[in-house]
Image (cartoon, helix red, strand yellow):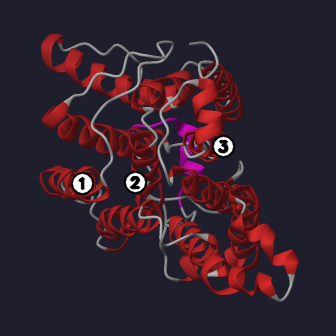
Amino acid sequence: MLYHWIYPLKVYWSGLNVLKYISVRMFIAAFIAMGIYFVFGRAMIRCLAARQFWQTVRNDGPVSHMDKRGTPTMGGLLLWGAVLVALLLCGRFDVPYIPISMAVIVIFGAIGFLDDYRKVILKDAKGLRARWKFPLQVATATIIVLILFDVVGLTRDITIPFFKDVRPDLGNWMVPFAVLVIVGTSNAVNLTDGLDGLVSMPSIVVFLAYAVIAYITGHAAIASYLQVPVIPGSGELAVLCGAIIGATLGFLWYNAHPASVFMGDVGSLPMGAVLGYVAVVTKSEILLVVIGGLFVLEAISVITQVISFKLTGKRIFRMAPLHHHFELKGWPESKVIVRFWIITIILALASLATLKLR
């Protein structure tokens, strides 16, 4: 709305001309979203606690996690509320990628809310069953992907890191591939959300990297210089990334160890889905494996653990996801968190370096 309603007033005050710059609106969106969480965060935590929206803790997990019982969850509600407000104020709605991203947030957030509702309100430890949860995710992602390709006109090729001219067109196979990226990333981030701040800081780092990528792919001159795909309008996704970074910083203020509130599935499921969505739009799906390497490792640890136990009756890790394995090896929770943060920063920097190495 700032762009559509206020920017035209530049004819009366030239200072409003700055609103045409994506970088300016990105920072404004970040500060708006962060400010909303800072202002309303404490009241939301009290409200969640009063209604006994408490985190469910596994009995077979690290003993130190027993102290987390009674900590409010579903803090992702305010996080995504702040993001949506920031986008309404700072996003350009004549660029289809912004309203589509808001649909991703709302629908995947609703799926996460149903999962949290069953766990927290109905006291069902299993939450929303996989036979319902997974099809809902796949159906949503499929609709989003078809809109991107058949309505918006996004091309169906992919970009291979380090190769400037290798962009294979997957044709109809691009649809299931893109769905896999969105749904897989959604669940990978969800699996990573197990320690105080473990998802928050890596998400900030990853979305910061994707803000750079989105800005580059949306800027014809820079994209041509770096020999990456030019995707008109994708630069607006930098505003989305800025809003998420700001809201997550506000959330981290209360989620830092020892956490006063947890994100819940209502927060982590859309976090991963939006990340996958941005990767699909910016043609950096393969690069996501590196940028979001921490999330990939966490997901792989769960998959290999399950396969190994079913086939051999033995576990590869002491406990999955991976962060619990290191906890059970004796690492303090804070050490696991910070070291995983460092890994994410290294991977993000390495990924951005590939934009030049072609």
Residue drawn at 73 percent across, 55 percent down: 23
Task: Give left or right: position of 231 versus 27.
Answer: left
Q: Earlier in the sequence, mark 2 or mark 3?
A: 3
Q: Quadrant of residue 111?
A: bottom left
Q: Nearer the viewer, mark 2 or mark 3?
A: 3
Q: Is residue 54 above or below residue 67?
A: below
Residue drawn at 80 percent across, 68 percent down: 18
Q: Position of residue 37 (x, y in %)?
A: 69, 71
For the magenta stretch, what is the residue range?
A: 60-69
In this rendered view, identify the residue nearer to me: 356 or 304.
356
Quadrant showing the N terminus: bottom right
Q: Are marks 3 and 1 in contact (CB under 8 Å)?
A: no
Q: Is residue 217 above or below residue 91?
A: above
Q: Earlier in the sequence, mark 1 or mark 2?
A: 1
Q: Is residue 137 above or below residue 185?
A: below
* 121 is within the stretch colored magenta: no
Neighbourhood count class around disc 2 (C-alpha, 10 Å): few under 14, some 14–19, many 20 upward: many
Q: Earlier in the sequence, mark 3 or mark 1?
A: 1
| Amino acid bearing label 1 | Gln
| Amino acid bearing label 3 | Leu
In this rendered view, identify the residue nearer to me: 349 or 23.
23
Residue beneath disc 3:
208
* 62 is within the stretch colored magenta: yes
Task: Give left or right: position of 176 versus 332.
Answer: left
